[in-house]
């Protein structure tokens, strides 16, 4: 991959990371927080993916009749890492959504500030 | 046994997963027995690995699977890793044993097997963080540990703990995100994921002077991600609600064990990836030192302001985490050794304090701190356990907390420059602040009870709690008296990293 396009991927990834990070931290709506986390994870997978891709090369699958020469293929390790990362990210989203369902059933709101106040009042 | 011992770290991690799976499938009560047996075996096997490390004096690298480095996955261990893994898994075991009555009184019986399953997953995560030699594996197990920690947090079903779990997860995910971004950037710069190869590449790149800013950014991202997950000031606002709202066993595991696993990973990365020279040259250590000192003060002030017994104990964790980060920031050898000693002191003391404060509050019928007067007289085992462990954290001579603080002071003096007055003043002020709330509470527990006489009946004997109370108090006393043994283990272990 040319240096310019790698920089482009890196810039887009960092912008997406910033969007996701700020959504996760600053959004009051719980669903938007979860979306923020997913955007943040996706941005990191994009960055990792761009590190493994080499322009002009093909996916590292050796077929019958072709030589097993590493110089023809892209780096498969980042793809493997991304698959693992996606599994982790999906599991986290599932747990977060399960928590959101339980919180919504209890307080009928998705606003974290309101929910926090309701929880304080409930205890008092 | 010496030939078999290198297999034990992987077996302990697999055993924790197997035990988690069995706990989820098998009927009630069997889950508890399986967890206790599995954790006991983990402690014993970690002890064997430690013994092997002491006998051979080598740092062993174990290849997982058939692909060798630099492509495959590895575990590595010498003395420090099995020692801390043994102590942390013993702490999880004792939290499960001591917290069983509280757990049964707060959780639905049909959900208990889920709790034990999650506790085993936490153990797997902690063990993997201690032993792993691959930075991406560390990330995956960190996430497994985070999700499982959330599972043991929500066992007590009320609104407050649901909200606390949500905040716990959000802050931990921010930390994981920063850590993962650091790992990806590091992979982009070096092209490696295994720690030894990373260390070689990082040292070469740092020496060449190229990529010094990206490398500093990687250190900042990884250190801040792990600091956030460990509850270091100013990322501590989620700690008190999460640790105080749940059952005593979970509070002990989260505070005494899960926090420490992330700090152990940071220490491993400092020694095995960045190298002490680069880490202390790029300024990250100074930031950790300053935030550690601020955390010591902020945690103590928060604890003094608390009027709730368990929330006070939870707030004191913020202060103790500050001590550990101050140690890491002070100097590479003695400072990090002091941090490891304080990890040990806190892992012994805090679960004991959580278990005993819950037990004392059950005796008085309230968590209000003002109502705990004389509670230690009504339940001497819980009272003594709380007092011994609180005194350990204050730094009372003869207890482990005293040793770690003495070594911290020595590290500060040896570091010289502005670090010496900063560390010494912080230690003095923090000792006074710790004394204000911990010694005050310890004394209050044993004051004679005034009228009206508490209406609650005297607490019934709780043998599992007594066993864990004796373990945690005994461990604080043991390491306090045989401190040289603990320090030798830590210092030899750090030299082998």
Image (cartoon, coloured by chain):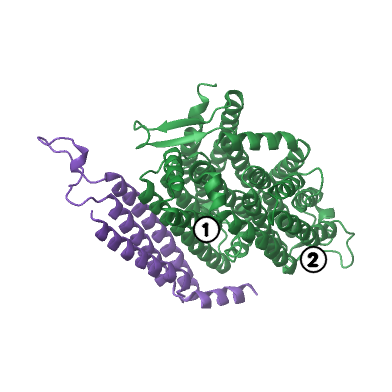
Chain colours: A purple, B green
Q: Circle 2 sits on which residue?
A: B371
- Density class for disc 1 (Cα within 10 Å; few <14, some 14-19, many ≥20) is many
Residue B202 visible somewhere in the drawing? yes
B66 above or below B414?
Answer: above
A55 above or below B22?
Answer: below
Front of the two marks 1 and 2: 1
Say the numbered circle drawn on residue B224.
1
Say which quadrant the N terminus of chain B sits in.
top right
Q: Where is residue A89 in the image (x, y as percent from the top left)?
A: 38, 57
Residue B123 visible somewhere in the drawing? no
In this rendering, position of residue A20 left or right of residue B446:
left
Task: Tell me the residue at 90%/59% (across/down).
Answer: B448
Q: In which quarter of the image is residue B317?
A: bottom right
Task: Tell me the residue at 65%/59% (across/down).
Answer: B318
> B331 and A18: which one is in front?
B331
Task: Tell me the residue at 56%/37% (across/down).
Answer: B81
Which chain hosts label 2? B
Say which quadrant the C terminus of chain B sits in.
top right
In this rendering, position of residue B399 left or right of residue A73:
right
- Density class for disc 2 (Cα within 10 Å; few <14, some 14-19, many ≥20) is some
Q: Position of residue A46 (x, y in %)?
A: 30, 58
> A77 and B332: which one is in front?
B332
Q: Quadrant of residue B304?
A: bottom right
A62 above or below B431?
Answer: above
Question: Gap in Å between the C-alphas at discs 1 and 2?
Answer: 39 Å
């Amino acid at each position: 991959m040319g240096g310019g396009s790698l920089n482009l991927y890196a810039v887009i990834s960092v912008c997406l990371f910033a969007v996701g990070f700020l959504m996760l931290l600053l959004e009051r709506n719980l669903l938007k927080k979860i979306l923020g986390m997913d955007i943040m994870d996706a941005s990191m997978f994009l960055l990792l993916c761009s590190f493994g891709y080499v322009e002009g090369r093909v996916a590292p699958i050796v077929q019958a009749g072709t030589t097993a020469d590493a110089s023809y293929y892209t780096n498969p390790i980042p793809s493997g890492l991304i698959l693992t990362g996606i599994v982790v990210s999906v599991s986290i989203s599932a747990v977060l959504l399960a928590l959101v369902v339980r919180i919504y059933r209890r307080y009928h709101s998705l606003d974290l500030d309101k929910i926090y106040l309701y929880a304080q009042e409930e205890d008092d | 046994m010496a030939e078999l011992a290198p297999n034990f770290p992987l077996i302990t991690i697999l055993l924790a997963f197997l035990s988690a799976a069995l706990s989820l499938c098998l009927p009630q009560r069997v889950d508890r027995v399986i967890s206790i047996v599995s954790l006991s075996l983990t402690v014993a096997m970690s002890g064997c690995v430690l013994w092997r490390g002491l006998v051979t004096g080598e740092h062993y690298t174990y290849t997982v699977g058939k692909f060798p480095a630099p492509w495959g996955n590895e575990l590595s261990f010498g003395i420090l890793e099995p020692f801390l893994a043994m102590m942390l898994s013993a702490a999880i075991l004792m939290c499960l044993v001591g917290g069983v009555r509280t757990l049964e009184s707060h959780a639905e019986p049909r959900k208990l097997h889920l709790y034990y399953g999650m506790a085993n997953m936490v153990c797997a995560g902690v063990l993997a963080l201690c032993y792993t030699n691959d930075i991406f594996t560390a990330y995956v197990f960190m996430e497994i540990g985070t999700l499982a920690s959330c599972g043991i947090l929500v066992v007590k079903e009320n609104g407050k703990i649901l909200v606390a779990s949500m905040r716990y997860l959000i802050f931990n995910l921010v930390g994981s995100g920063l850590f993962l971004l650091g790992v990806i950037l590091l992979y982009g710069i070096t092209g490696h994921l295994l720690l030894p190869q990373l260390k070689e590449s990082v040292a070469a790149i740092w020496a060449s002077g190229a990529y010094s800013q990206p490398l500093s950014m990687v250190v900042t991202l990884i250190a801040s991600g792990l600091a956030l997950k460990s509850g270091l000031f100013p990322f501590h606002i989620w700690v008190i609600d999460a640790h105080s709202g749940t059952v005593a066993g979970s509070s002990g595991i989260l505070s005494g064990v899960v926090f420490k696993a992330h700090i152990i990973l940071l220490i491993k990365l400092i020694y095995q990836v960045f190298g002490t020279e680069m880490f202390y040259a790029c300024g990250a250590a100074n930031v950790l030192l300053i935030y550690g000192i601020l955390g010591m003060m902020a945690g103590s002030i928060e604890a003094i302001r608390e009027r709730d017994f368990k929330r006070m104990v939870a707030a004191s964790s913020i202060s103790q985490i500050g001590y550990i980060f101050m140690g890491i920031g002070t100097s590479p050898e003695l400072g990090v050794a002091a941090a490891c000693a304080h990890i040990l002191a806190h892992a012994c003391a805090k679960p004991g304090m959580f278990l005993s404060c819950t037990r004392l509050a059950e005796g008085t019928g309230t968590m209000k701190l003002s109502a705990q007067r004389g509670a230690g007289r009504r339940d001497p085992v819980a009272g003594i356990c709380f007092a011994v462990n609180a005194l350990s954290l204050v730094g009372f001579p003869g207890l482990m907390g005293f040793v770690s603080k003495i070594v911290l002071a020595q590290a500060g003096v040896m570091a010289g420059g502005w670090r010496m007055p900063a560390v010494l003043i912080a230690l003095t002020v923090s000792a006074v602040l710790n004394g204000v709330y911990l010694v005050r509470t310890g004394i209050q527990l044993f004051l004679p009870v005034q009228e009206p006489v508490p209406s609650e009946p005297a607490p019934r004997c709780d043998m599992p709690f007594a066993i864990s109370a004796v373990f945690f108090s005994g461990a604080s006393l043991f390491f306090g008296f045989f401190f040289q043994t603990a320090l030798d283990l830590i210092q030899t272990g750090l030299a082998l990293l």
